[in-house]
Amino acid sequence: MTNKVWVYVDQFKGEALPASWEAVTAGRDLADKMGTGLTAIVIGSGVEAIANTAIQYGADEVLLADDASLEDYRANPYTAVFAKAAADAAPDVVLFPTTSRGREVAAMAAIDLNTGVLVDVTAMETEGDAILATRPVYAGKLLCKVKCATRPQLVTLRVRSFGKPELDESRTGTTTAIDAVMAEDEIATKVLDYVDAGGGVSLSDANVIVSGGRGVSSNPAEAPADLSAEDQEIWKAHEGFRLIGELATVLGGAVGASRAAVDAKYIPYAHQVGQTGKVVSPDLYIASGISGAIQHLAGMRSSKVIVAINKDADAPIFKLARYGVVGDLYDIVPALTVALKERLGK
Ligand SMILES: Cc1cc2nc3c(=O)[nH]c(=O)nc-3n(C[C@H](O)[C@H](O)[C@H](O)COP(=O)(O)OP(=O)(O)OC[C@H]3O[C@@H](n4cnc5c(N)ncnc54)[C@H](O)[C@@H]3O)c2cc1C
């Protein structure tokens, strides 16, 4: 009998994203509540190890599409494999991690399967075989509950909203091979190269994020006089982000930014947090020189602990912050780095 609950495992270059395992946590819980098994679907080339890990994390069965044509992620062949498997087996619900690939496959498969997607879900309840999903709306100001009237119910799960599962190396399950659906000559997209546009930033997976905003350009240091006014500002901000990067490194975290900092070319877009950037939920979010505009808060308000550093005591970010430091980030950030280095023995 086919399992009613499925999880789509997102992998890149043979490595599963941690968000995929969070989806397995949610899927295991759902499958137990619905009295069914959990199937993970793994698509790629040379990804058998991921299938085994999915079982060790809690899947009962893995559908494994392992084919040379699936080595690079391409939306059409991946969606074709997924949609065919789902059409054949008719699961009630499929959980996807809210990664760029997960979102893309869910959206495209919804068209093929003539069903809906519940997106960016942070919590789920069951009503029989229906999922009652909670998702933030209006930049996180409201939480709404949504249901899908059609089947399968495709659900994308917000990263870091569901816990990480425990790996149980003794767990066993079945792996069933499934075929690629599109032949190479039917696939219009060819991957020529990968270019890292973000300096290896993985904000979504970071436990700690230290972010900088427009305030970072208020660097008191003298910029080289032969630079234009705009470049002097960028030079100052780069120095500020270097200090923010040092603090992030001491804490083992990643560097984030507001859109104002990105628009002013202080730092690449890959670092942007907010409504039009990444939505993050780290254990610790340190906002420095960021005022706390609603569009920024939309991307980080679900962080477990928020610390704000701002020289304006009335900055809106302090309303959300658990700890607030009123002061100049050029004093506070380096002082924090020194103190934490000492405390953490680094
Ligand atoms: C459709 C739309 C989408 C948007 N999407 C996003 C998004 O995804 N992400 C996002 O961030 N914004 C987004 N914005 C922009 C948002 O509205 C704000 O303009 C932006 O977040 C402001 O960035 P900021 O806080 O860095 O700058 P500001 O609002 O200018 O704040 C700078 C802060 O730095 C403080 N400061 C200055 N110097 C220092 C110092 N030396 N030490 C300490 N503090 C200092 C100031 O007191 C101030 O509070 C969006 C806007 C729109 C309209």
Image (cartoon, rainbow, N blue to C red):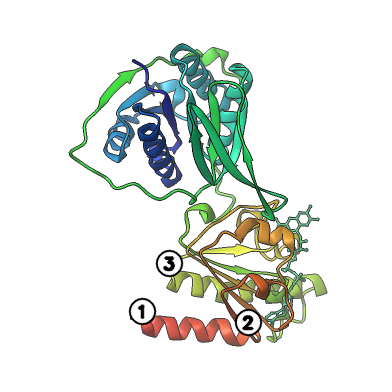
Measured Cα–Cα span from mark 2 to mark 1: 21 Å
Q: Are marks 1 and 3 in contact (CB under 8 Å)?
A: no
Measured Cα–Cα span from mark 1 to mark 3: 11 Å
The residue tagged 1 is 344
Can I make out residue 87 in this image? yes
Q: Which amino acid, mark 2?
A: Leu
Mark 2 closeness class: few <14, some 14–19, many ≥20 residues within 10 Å: many
Q: Nearer the viewer, residue 144 or 23?
A: 144
> Which image quadrant: the N terminus?
top left
Q: Nearer the viewer, residue 254 or 151?
A: 151
The residue tagged 2 is 329
Mark 1 / mark 3, whichever is N-terminal: 3
Measured Cα–Cα span from mark 2 to mark 3: 20 Å
Mark 3 closeness class: few <14, some 14–19, many ≥20 residues within 10 Å: few
Q: Is residue 182 above or below residue 294?
A: above
Tell me the SS state at disc 2. helix
Give x and y (percent) for residue 204: 52, 52
Mark 2 / mark 1, whichever is N-terminal: 2
The residue tagged 3 is 252
Mark 3: C-beta under 8 Å from nearest atom of ligand 1: no
